[in-house]
Image (cartoon, rainbow, N blue to C red):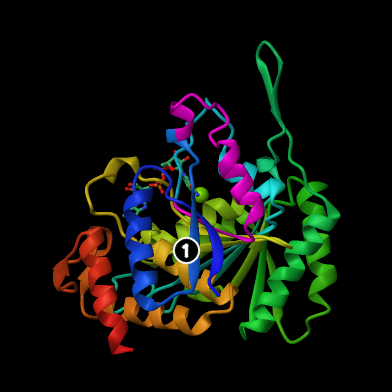
Amino acid sequence: KPVKIAVAKGDGIGPEIMNATLRILSAAGAHIEPEFIELGEKVYLSGNTSGIDDASWEAVNNNKVIFKAPITTPQGKGYKSLNVTLRKSLGLFANIRPVQALTPYVPSHFPAMDVVVIRENEEDLYAGIEHRQTQDVYQCLKLITRPGCERIVRYAFEYAKAYGRKKVTCMLKDNIMKITDGLFHKVFDEIAVEYPEIQNETQIIDIGSARLANQPENYDVIVTANLYGDIISDIAAEIGGSVGMCGSANIGKNVAMFEAIHGSAPDIAGKNIANPSGLINAAVSMLAHIGQPEIGDKVKNAWLVTLEQGYHTADIYREGVSKERLGTKEFADHVITNLDKT
Ligand code: NAI
Ligand code: MG
């Protein structure tokens, strides 16, 4: 019986990369039944200021799995980020963002890079507690709770254990934010002792992120607060090859949402040049999550073979390394052809 999933095609490059990915999933024989929902800028511009209509909201609540292309959120104005709203209202407390360099097939300065950023996904400065205090004073509250820290830190160690990873690094700014980030650090130390087989370390986020950018091979699993995790996962993805390569899983107790880590890339939308790999990787972890790991592996292998053959989208194309620069659709076609080779 196919697994029902809510699917949002999103804004910008969203529909292009979602259509490409859904074609691959269908060719691979994924047992899924998509229920298409509308959310994001299109809905907002049509007059619904929340950015999501009632039917889609109901579909989100009726499905245990959401597969979502990026959506556009206006900067500094307009509706509240729907990503933040979805993560918070569905209790998606953990955001898992793996980055693995694929040298020599995909150029990266860091061939040995293999990092998983585990980001707390509901609290911190993204809790949405922001207001204007007086004429010229504005405030944004940083929310850190003990249960929130415990959940994400435990998740990171359990993840490390399950995937045979050796080290968890916690990155914070607890020299300055002694009470909030200090609590996260304290909880990290408390929980780390329960996992003696896994190394642990803490770094202050400024030097930590700088070292991540310079020596990513020294990191394995990184656990951090929401804002820091958002920033360092983009850095990690970009130095690993391209922000277009990485997918993410937003995990909650009852619901999970899978998406690319990047945004709607309006600068390249509608040109058939976006890299669908981030969403393809998100789909692979979604398939594992819904109990179809062998189909996920098949998709992943076909994707790897395609990259190995040198068929690259523009963001990872390099003269002398790549064989051919492909559009979004054509890249997906090659992945589909390669499904038979695995
Ligand atoms: P972005 O991630 O959309 O784009 C940053 C840069 O990376 C751009 O130059 C873009 O062309 C490139 N890029 C991104 N994805 C790519 C892909 N798959 N293939 C090739 N190149 C790719 O970030 P930006 O421009 O800051 O944000 C655009 C919009 O996306 C904003 O409205 C933002 O709020 C939204 N956004 C949505 C997210 C989501 O729905 N989960 C996550 C991040 C941003
Ligand atoms: Mg981001």
Which residue is at the far front? 1
The part of the image, by quadrant, that contains residue 103 is bottom left
What is the secondary structure assignment of the residue under circle 1? strand
The part of the image, by quadrant, that contains residue 239 is bottom left
Question: Which image quarter is the C terminus in?
Answer: bottom left
Question: Which image quarter is the N terminus in?
Answer: bottom right
Residue depicted at x 19% and y 74%? 321
Residue nearer the viewer, 325 or 16: 16
Residue 318 is left or right of residue 290, and the answer is left
Q: Is residue 109 above or below residue 243?
A: below
Based on the picture, tell me whether residue 107 belongs to the magenta stretch: no
Residue nearer the viewer, 43 or 12: 43
Picture coordinates of residue 312, whole percent (x, y): 23, 67
Picture coordinates of residue 35, whole percent (x, y): 50, 55
The part of the image, by quadrant, that contains residue 167 is bottom right
- Give, as a three-letter code, the residue at label 1: Gly
Q: Is residue 146 above or below residue 337?
A: above
Ligand 1 within 8 angstroms of badge 1 C-beta: no
Picture coordinates of residue 320, whole percent (x, y): 14, 73
Residue 301 is left or right of residue 96, and the answer is left
Q: What stretch is highlighted in magenta?
A: 43-69
Q: In this view, does 150 lie above or below 339?
A: above
Residue 215 visible within the image: no
Based on the picture, tell me whether residue 47 belongs to the magenta stretch: yes
Which residue is at the far top? 135
Residue depicted at x 58% and y 31%? 50
Where does label 1 land, which residue? Answer: 247
Residue 337 visible within the image: yes
Residue depicted at x 29% and y 44%? 269
Packing grade of label 1 (10 A; few <14, some 14-19, many >=20) is many
Picture coordinates of residue 34, whole percent (x, y): 48, 60
